[in-house]
Amino acid sequence: MATTQYLFAGFGGQGILFSGKFLAYKGLTEDKQVSWLPSYGPEMRGGTASCSVILSDSPVGSPIVSKPDVLVAMNLPSLDKYEDSVVSGGTIFVDSALIERKVKRDDVTVHYIPATKLASDNGMPTLANMIIVGKILKELGGYNEETVNAALGKVISAKRADMLDVNKKAMQIGAKN
Amino acid sequence: MADKVLMKGNEAIAEAAIIAGCRHYFGYPITPQTEIAAYMAKRMPKIGGCFLQAESEVAAINMVYGVASTGYRVMTSSSSPGISLKGEGLSYLAGADLPSLVINVQRGGPGLGGIQPSQSDYYQATKAGGHGDFRMIVLAPASVQEMADLTVKGFDLADKYRMTSMILADGTMGQMMEPVSLDYEVSKPVEKPWATTGTKMEREHNIVNSLFLQPDELEKSNNERFERYKYIEENEAMYEEYMMDDAEICITAFGIASRVAKNAIVEARKKGIKVGMIRPITLWPFPNKPFEDTIGKIKTYISVELSMGQMIDDVKLATKCSGEYVLCNRVGGMIPSPEEVLAAIEKANGGNK
């Protein structure tokens, strides 16, 4: 009964909730049990935003992720706040373009990726979040072209279909770096 | 089976209401339930329905009274402080025996409180929705799927018994997304011969009213209403039992608290502790029967609540104060962690040795 608990955290506007939603949809297309819970309220209005995503082979109990297996930190306050909560043996993804310090713990796997810089260098400044998602899928063995496309199709509305390719490209950049 | 889609709990309520035939929604925005109104604003005009943002919660509930009088399915939604404002209208709906669906996506209180999840309106929903002797059917969803299912069920029960059904959810249930299937066989609308639909000069006037100035008539209407309540108590209670077969410790929790408690029960079972859970799905009528059945078998009841301890009173009544009772709670928008619940279970277990 595998269960993976993800915590995405960063500034409001970085696409934290969107990347979590993508992952949840990807889980759904793979017949997993999923839950997605956003932070709501003052923090989403310009401050820190976070979202809990759980993918599991069995029904999800509490949707609140307090001890993530995977932490995505897209700014320093998020890394400061959540670094200690990651389970031993867990994984932390750090946007190293925005966070200068290294992760202090030595019992977790850390992936540094300058996502925000890669995004602006590639002319997609709003897609640092999806670059990190690409990295997550590559490192954690979930980069499956078919389910990625299916999930993108669900999470991006028909009206924004022009965004499909650039999202895919962002994930490919993440997977290569 | 229909395809499952990911939806927020609030959106699932709104779509399920539309599927159930609701074409009239009145509300006033308040976090954390605003997605219900937003969804209705988008959908209702496209399907010939009515979305109206009222000038206040008080106005909205009285618009519900108006539409309910005509026999159409109607709903309003709000969060804790807004529900308090609707209290007068809820009492009038009860006094006039009108069916309606009211959603409370609870936040921390009292007063303006906060906007994070809470379950501290349990007393209000189950015992004191407004003045006078009356009840509402109170449904407590613990998943996005149940947010939708109980919305449909709530309309059916409201029509069947001519009373208000309330969905008592909380901020997490409203905001979280889970896969949901909205594949319903919608039941046939019940006949509403009492509705004010115009006499066409063919029948006597129907009058919808809650004013009875003759005390004997008012007493009679109260007694008749409580006969109906008695039938509901005997026939409509809903609950879920989880790992109760050999349980020596019984968790009681509803909504989000029950989800957290499940995690704790799984961990406690790994340690060999015999713990289970009774999760009320209807808070009124309270499911007394499964609790009565535990008398003599359960030594400790742990009520996990996002309140200072409200449902625990009903647990004590249902089990005739036959056990030990422990409250495991957080309030103000905080949610107990599975570890906190596990600690309460372990403490109760140590006490049993």
Image: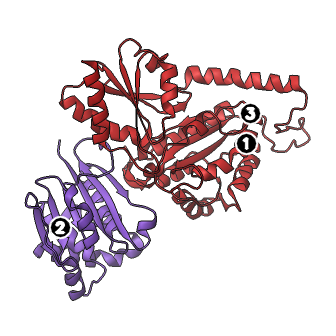
Chain colours: A purple, B red
What's the chain of the residue with tag 3? B
> In whole angstroms, how far apart are the C-alphas of marks 2 and 3?
57 Å
Amino acid of disc 2: Phe
Q: Is residue A22 left or right of residue B206?
A: left
Q: Is residue B36 left or right of residue A13?
A: right
Query: Is circle 1 on the same chain as circle 2?
Result: no
Amino acid of disc 1: Gly
Q: Which mark is residue A93?
A: 2
Question: For the residue labelled by badge 2, is the local secondary structure a helix, a strand or a loop?
Answer: strand
Answer yes or no: is residue A47 visible: yes
Which quadrant: the N terminus of chain A? Answer: top left
Q: Which mark is residue B193?
A: none
Query: Is circle 3 on the same chain as circle 1?
Result: yes
Of residues A156 and B287, which is closer to you in this image?
B287
Crowd class of label 2 (few under 14; some 14 to 19; many from 20; radius 10 Å): many
Q: Is residue B95 left or right of residue B135?
A: right
Give the image location of residue A60, x and y in percent. Answer: 29, 44
Give the image location of residue A77, x and y in percent. Answer: 28, 70
Q: Which mark is residue B132?
A: 3
Q: Quadrant of residue B261?
A: top left
Give the image location of residue B213, x and y in percent. Answer: 90, 32
